[in-house]
Structures are given as C-alpha cells and as structure tokens.
Amino acid sequence: MKVTKIHADETLEWIEVPDPVCADGEALIEIHAAAVNRADLLQRAGKYPPPPGWPEWPGLEVAGKILEAPADSGWKPGDCVCALLGGGGYAEKVAVPVELLMPVPAGLSFAEAAALPEVFATAWLNLVGEAHTQSGETVFVHAGASGVGTAAIQIAKHLGARTVASVGSADKVTLMQDLGVDRVIHHQQEDVGAVFDECAEAGHPVNVALDCVGGAGLGEHIAKLAISGRWVLIATLGGPTTELNLRAVLTRKLRLIGSTLRSRSLAEKKQILSDLVTELWPKFESGEIRPVIHRVLPIQEADEAHRILQSRENLGKVVLTIRDGAESPVST
C-alpha cells in the first residue's frame, strides 16, 4: 500500500510500504478519505509523535470500508465506517482497534464522514465530559471557524446552550452566522473581554469556554466567566503562558481544565464514540448537524492541505481523498 511519509527535512512523499497486519481486536480498513488536523502539522515538525503502536505517518481520522474484522466484533467486510486513530490515516489502509470504529451516518460521503471522528469527539469530550454544559448556559468557542470550533458550536446548540464564538475574518463571521451563533466576535475589530462583559450585562454570562488558543488572553478573560464557570484548554496556539488572577478564580469558584483526546485510554475513547453515535448520528442523518468542509484535495496534495491549515485560511475541515468517489454519498 501507499502512505504519506514525513522525511527528516519535513517534506512529504507518497510511497509504498508493506500492508498493515491486524493484531487481536483490530479491523483492517480500506481508506477512502482522511481529514487533516493541526496535530498533523505538529507531527510533521517533529513536535507530536504518534503514540506507541500506531504508524509513523500522520492522520487522526479516516473513513472507508472494512476489509477484515474479528468475527465477534459486530463488524464485517464491506461495512462503511469512520474511525478515530492515533496516527496512520494518510494511507491506503490502516489497522484499527474495533472500539474506535463508527458507522458512516446515512447520507454522508466518505469525505464528510472522515471529518467527524477527531473534532466531534474532541468537542463532545470537553463540552459534555469535562465542562458538563447545561441547557440555557452560554458557551464561548475560541477559533470558531476551525474544525473543532464548528463541531463545538453545533454540539453546544444541540445541548441547548447559547453560543459565542471568536473568528478573525469577515468570511468566518459569515460562517458563524450561518451556523446560528448568537454572538460572533471578530477579534481583529473588537475585544473578547468586552464581549464577555456585554454578555454578563445582558443576563447571560459565559459559563463555559472551549479554548485552543491559551496565551495571555486566557488569564485576562477567565476572570469574566460566570460564577462556577469552566474554562477548558485544549491547545496553546496563542502561547503556553498567561497570568492568572487567583482571587477571581477563588471567589468566583472557577475551574481551569486542561484536556487532550489523544492521551485518553481506549475505554474512554470507546465511550465517547458510542455517545456520538447515539446522540449525534441521527442529527447528521437528518441534516440538523453537518460537518463543515472547507476543501477536499487528493492525498497527493497533502502539502497544500497543510498550507491551508498553517495559514489559518480554512473554514472548517480540510479533507484528503485516497480513492475516487469519496465525495459521493456512501452506498452500503
């Protein structure tokens, strides 16, 4: 099979390697599409190696057809699935623990299904599992036009929350409006903290923040959360340090939660994915929730896909296709 290898000089090459061999409890997937994540850029730069046991090439989420599956797994050859990976998605095939498989929602293409596992699992884990978001609360999503951002906004609305999101361009403001965000912040033109104050004055202070930016803004804005507010940090794109007003944390009963999906146990991931299928798959099939896809490119153009994410041009997900027909609705 072919895979996208990262060379020492950070160049990418679509090259031939041996086919994967399934271990006990694994299924073999013929990959039709793989989605791109910012973690792939970090791995390419040598800063985010795959966990032990996973392939060395990048790719955290895929969709395709099962070629082999354990007899007692409930899966069979030909089943259309999407999967959460620890790595190895930029390839023609991958071996995956069956706990990390989900069916492709009816009516979606492989390209759309590949855009689901990583970002919707991340958003669900943190809004539901970590922050325990409740109906009627206000959720702030930093970088709302990112893959995780567009997933989090839709999940927050599904939970009955009011949504606030920050973006950095006019086209991203339009996307937020299309997704029904209640208050959009163009952070090039207005201050995030001032909008937090505005929300509080209007009677709906921010209860939950999902933050992939961190940096100085975290310390500045966390003190403006509602009483018992929860700030969930999932990345530090804006820098790894900040200054906190501990008195505000103490008196307002605030919680700062650090969270990553990739380091979770197999059992935890299985539960998250099971919850997604139960709670959100019917919403995908009805069209109430949708993957937001910025661009679909062939796997041979992975360089361009990475450039789009690096320059923060994307509105939603960038997806790589491995086989023809990945953009057509899946037929089972």
Image: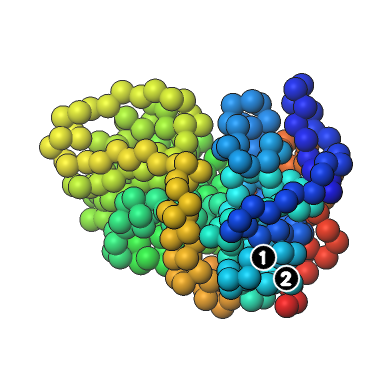
Which residue in the protein does label 1 denote? 69
Q: CA distance from mark 1 to mark 2?
A: 7 Å
At which x and y percent is residue 98? 58, 61
Left or right, 132 with reference to 41: left
Determine which of the numbered discs, if any, sits on residue 119 in the image: none
Which residue in the protein does label 2 denote? 77
In-front residue for pair 311/44? 44
What amino acid is at disc 2?
Pro
What amino acid is at disc 1?
Ala
Q: Which structural element holds mark 2?
A: loop
At which x and y percent is residue 141? 43, 48
Which residue is pictured at 44% across the width and 55% down the height? 267
At which x and y percent is residue 244? 27, 27
Relative to 143, is 280 above or below? below
Which residue is pictured at 20% across the width and 47% down the height? 228
Left or right, 31 with reference to 128: right
Tag count in the figure? 2
Which residue is pictured at 64% across the width and 38% down the height? 40
Residue furthest left as drawn: 251
- Quadrant (top left/top right/bottom left/bottom right) for the C terminus: bottom right
Left or right, 276 with reference to 249: right
Q: Residues within 10 Å of mark 2 (few under 14, many from 20)?
A: some
